[in-house]
Each structure stands twice: as structure tokens, then as C-alpha cells.
Image (tube, rainbow, N blue to C red):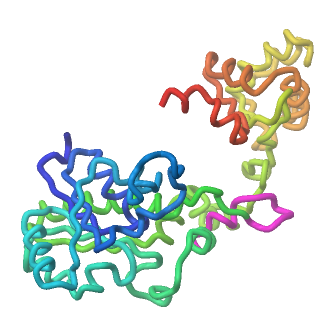
Amino acid sequence: MLLQPYRVLDLTDHRGEVAGMILGDLGAAVIKVEPPGGSPARQAFPHLPPDAGVADELKSLQFLAYNRGKRSIVLDLAADADRATFLQLVATADFVLDSGVPGRLAEAGIDFEALRAANPRIVCVLHTPYGLDGPRAHWRDSDLVLTALGGSAALCGAPTRPPVRVSVPQVWRHAGAEGALAAMVAHARRLQTGEAQFVDVSAQSCNTWTLLNAMTASAIQGVDFRRRGAFLQLGGVTIPLVYECRDGHLICITSGNTMKVIVPWMVADGIVDASWNDEDWSTWDMRFQSGQPVAHTISDVAEAYERWMHQYTKRELLERGLASGISFAPVNDLEDALAFEHLQAR
């Protein structure tokens, strides 16, 4: 395993526990350092049902998912004996993970200098909502607020309605993943310099990185991306993404490569005539986006898609797409997800 020689001390709550999980999955030995009464993350919802027969401290499915493979030690860092035990652990560790402003360590009066004194090569990663310093450093945080301030909420939802957020909290999941990456970058720096490293991971900044090309849209094209709901904006062209099928809806990006596969199917089903096979679909995207002539416009294609997909169920289209190397993404409700074979197998 990549990180098998290394030890991680994980003091995080829900705001960074993914970092320790990832480092553990890469082979590191991870010790969860919990306060008396256990980490608050042990109470995070959703919970196992009361009749599951598990101890109260193991009822949180989120805690079980993101703390798998970790060992645990309970230490009261305000007590001299436990504080000494913790610093002894630091001397044998490679990484220390913490979360919050100021964080458990700072609340106990243990700063980075104290960690470095115990271990001159330690890497410390602190997960914070907005950064350890700056104008928002001490603002209260929630997934909703960080989603909005990070920018992703502004891009989600229909343009005629208020912005929306991803239903399952995501901000601290992304921050934890970035925290694991930050730990490895700091580790590489430590190998070069031989010096201890401190990294401040801002969840707001991490969320902004999830916006992909929206981050640079203004600099490149002069305007920011706007939310388009069920439509994709490609330059000056708006493309439908969601189509109604026999038992619900399905997402398909209208591209030339997709059309090369689908057009013969639509011709065979009588949706379009055989002349559609004469279009050069390999250059169709480039031509319609640049305003060059095309035999069939994006409106023509979207209307044909809609009529063709009405004949089939989401599952039929998904399986047909998988077998042919094109992407059909069913819009699943909870019942669909629970019945999905891939999730059942996992």
C-alpha cells in the first residue's frame, strides 16, 4: 500500500473526516483522536434503525462510512496526562488532521509550534470553513451557506427560479478530499526540505474548485456562466439535456458522436427518414456551434430525440447506450436508485 509506512492522527469531526479515510484507504495507519464522549461526528444523521442492535456510538451511517479502518483513542487534551500522551503520539506520527476554527488543538492550547517541537517533520492539515484568517474566518458555517458562498448554488437550478443546492451535503466531502491531497503536497514539500508543514484548507475555496470551467468563464469569454436548469450552454447555442421517455426522464448530451450511433436507430424506428444518415455527424457539433450550415438543426435533433425516446423506458435506453458506448443517464428517483443493480451489487 502506498502510505503503509505512515501514521495519521485524525482529530477531525464531520468537517474533515474524509481526509483521514482517504489516507487510510491508501494504506496509512489512522488513529481517530476523540474527545471524552466521542467525536460529535458519531451523532451525524442518517442513523441505523433502533432495532439494528448496534451501540449508540456506532449508529451514524455517515460516521461508519467515513471512518472505516481507523483506530480510536479518547483523550482529553485539556488534561495534562492526556495532553502528554497526545504529544507522544505526535512524535511517532507523520500527519495530524484537525477541523474547525480554531480547531480542537488550538482550543486545547496546542499550536503548530508545539506540534513541531514534538516532531520537527510533522505535517498538520486544518480544515476550516473560510480559512484560518481573513474577514470571514469566524463566520458561522453550514453546508448551505458554503455552497452559496462557494458559487455552486448559483449554477444549479432553472434560470427563472431561485438557485438550489445539491440535496446531499457535499461541501465537507470535497474539503476532506482536498485535505488528503493537501497532506500529500505538504508531505512532498517535507521530503524536499525536511521541515514540518502546516496547511489551511478552506471549504469555501474547495467548493469553488468544483465549478470547473465556470471558474474561468469570465476571464475567457467575458461573462460568467449562468444556471440553465435542464439546458447546456455551448457558446451561443443552448442545448436541451433532459428528455422524456416512456417511464420518466433521461439525460443525453446531443453530440455528433452520439448522433452517429442513434440516427440509424431512429431511421429503423421510423422517427426520421433515411436522409439523416447523409449528414456528416463527425463535424456536426463544430459546424452548428460556429454557425456553419447543417442539414439538421439542434431543434430538429431535439424534437427527433423526444419522439424516439418516448417509445422506450429509462432502463432500456440505459442498457442500449452501455452496449453501444454512448451515455444515457436516467433521472432516477429514490425507488429507482434502490433497485439499481450496480448499487445492489455493491
Residue 53 located within the stretch drawn in magenta:
no
**Where does residue 342 sit, x and y in percent of width and height?**
55, 28
Left or right, residue 8 beside residue 224: left
Q: Residue at x 46, y 88 (%)?
A: 138
Residue 167's place in the image compared with 287, above or below, is below
Is any atom of residue 325 visible in this view?
A: yes
Report the residue that reaches farthest toward the top: 268
- What is the magenta range? 149-163
Left or right, residue 269 beside residue 26: right
Q: Residue at x 55, y 56 (%)?
A: 212
Say which of 250 and 12 sits in front.
12
Say which of 244 and 77 sits in front.
77
Residue 160's place in the image compared with 315, above or below, is below
Q: Residue at x 77, y 41 (%)?
A: 241
**Where does residue 16 sit, x and y in percent of width and height?**
38, 64
Is any atom of residue 286 visible in this view?
A: no
Left or right, residue 235 beside residue 25: right
- Residue 124, image quadrant: bottom left
Q: Residue at x 79, y 13 (%)?
A: 264
Residue 176's place in the image compared with 138, above or below, is above
For the N terminus, the image quarter is top left
